[in-house]
Amino acid sequence: MLTREVWLVLALSLGASAVSAVISFAGVLTSHQPLSGQTAVIVGSRAPGRPWLDLAWQVFGVATALVPVALVAHLLARGGESLRSLGFDRRDPWRDLVRGAAVAACVGGAGLAFYLAAHASGANLTVEPAQLPDTWWRLPVLIAVAAQNAVLEEVVVLGYLTRRLDQLGWSRRRSTTASALLRGSYHLYQGLGGFVGNVVMGVLFCHLYRRWGRVMPLVVAHTLIDVVALVGATYLIGKVGWLPG
């Protein structure tokens, strides 16, 4: 039952995203263009030229992306657990914030350097964080997407998946490998650099999660990393020479 549960949760969430990213990457490899000459857009417009309709689609996308988190909460509750069992709560907000900010500073800086190196080597697509109209809601939507990505990925791939694999008798090394490879695979649409960088990040996050026993600091870290990436790059691309765009 637990094995089927894990497969169903992943099929409805980031497992499906991983398959989609693999198909996307296969299309990139067979397009007869260099990887660095192609673009991967993270947050694109859903209704170009119609800002209010676009906003409605963006809000809808963020809300529906979090449904798997609600499903995980439901499944945990049926077994007498909760998201609190994963450390997704507000029991220790200041420590979670400090730890998350420290992790974000280290991982974010290293991640940017790795992306630039991977792009320069031709192993990564040019990542364009957002193609949204320059309206009042662009910044709030980017922040909401960053938080949504963090909650979905860390609750499902870090907290829930590793907990279920532990309950199934997997070794720590094996469950860490599975979680990290899944994290890398749904970033494969960005290229090999996105895959490798996120596998390394996945291993680190699994280590920190097991050490702290809480997923919340990693949610904070992931949110901060994505906010800087989405918002910062949106306003810097085309204005600084070192950032591809």
Image (tube, rainbow, N blue to C red):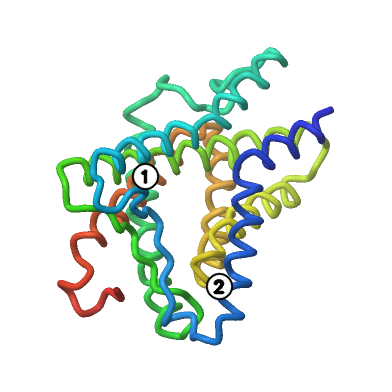
> Residue 214: where, in percent of width, then height?
52, 32
Horizontal side of 118 relative to 170 (left or right) equals: left
Q: Nearer the viewer, residue 45 or 180?
A: 45
Residue 93 in view of the camera? yes
Whole-number angstrom distance, CA of label 1 to CA of label 2? 22 Å
Mark 1 is on which residue type?
Ala
Q: Which residue is mark 1?
A: 146
Mark 2, residue position: 192
Residue that extends furthest to the front in the rendered view of this protein: 49
Neighbor class of circle 1 (other Cα within 10 Å; few <14, some 14-19, many 20+) is: many
Of callouts 1 and 2, the N-terminal one: 1
Q: Nearer the viewer, residue 199 or 40?
A: 40
Depth check: give the residue in front, 128 or 152.
128
Vertical order, 96 against 100 (above or below): above
Q: Is residue 243 left or right of residue 208?
A: left
Q: Amino acid at mark 2?
A: Leu
